[in-house]
Amino acid sequence: MAGKYRYIIKFLVLKNLQVKYKQTALGFLWSLLHPALYLLIFVAIFSSAFQSIPNYPLYVLSGLVFWIYFAEAVNRLSQVFIKNTHMIKCLGIPKITYAITELGSELLSFLLGLIPFLVIMFFIGLDFSANLLFLIPFIILFSVFIFSVGTFLGSFNVFFRDVGLLWFTLNPAIFYLSPIAYSYEIVPDKFKYLVMYNPLYYFLEIIRDILYYGQTPGFRIWLYCIIITVITGLLAYFTYSKTKNSFISNL
């Protein structure tokens, strides 16, 4: 499908980016200001509380940049079929194309924003080593996970609009259940299971190994993330396959 609809996908990816930053004074810079603002807040408020975490700004930023990619991409994917109602009804291209292009535009925006943040991380302690090459398979795996979560939610949201509202409501809870501004070690033992049941915990472990600790992520943590991605992908595939033929009558 990617080859057959290659030009349509490219056109829609660029269109999504243009719409996202249309009539904004700062344009693409908003994607840089978002994590930068969060970082300033965390450093100003929590750095003294988490003195046990060496180089707290690097610790926060390494997780924060990827959280924002996850949150924004899933938010957009959860609305993608509703947003493209008119095109779905008028054009005969596969409906999943709209989800692919939505992720594509978010991924492109994320990658462009990641470059200056890697430079910032370098100045606050990031070790530029061969371990950074692990970013490539990690971003691919993480993007597939994001696509699966977003497509799963987006398919259900066509029929139950509460799904989109529920996701926006749960977003802050998922953020605070993810060890972004704090370390897993400080979580009380009786609540550690809440963090470990959060799939993002395992992805954050990999990215922290790469960007914060400057070490090669272990095989076990990669395996956990691959299993999570496969399971999520199967759920998304099953949900989309069962619901796609009824999209038009419910949009």
Image (cartoon, rainbow, N blue to C red):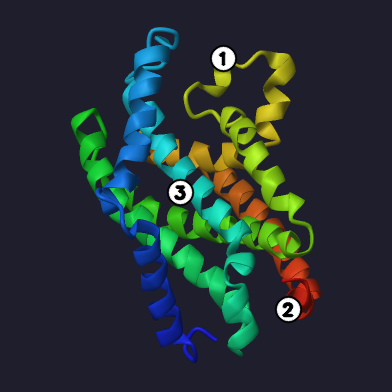
Tell me: residue 110, above or below residue 188.
below
Q: Quadrant of the N terminus?
A: bottom right
Where is residue 104 drawn, in percent x and y? 44, 67
Residue with the mark numbered 3:
69
The residue lying toward the viewer, choosing from 142 and 14, is: 14
Of labels 1 and 3, earlier in sequence is 3
Tell me: residue 152, above or below residue 86.
above
What amino acid is at disc 3? Tyr
Q: Residue at x 62, y 73 (%)?
A: 85
Of marks 1 and 3, the one in the foreground: 3
What amino acid is at disc 1? Ile
Q: Which residue extends farthest front?
A: 23
- Whether residue 217 appears in this view of the structure is no
Of marks 2 and 1, the one in the foreground: 2
Where is residue 166 drawn, in percent x and y? 71, 44
Q: Secondary structure at mark 3?
A: helix
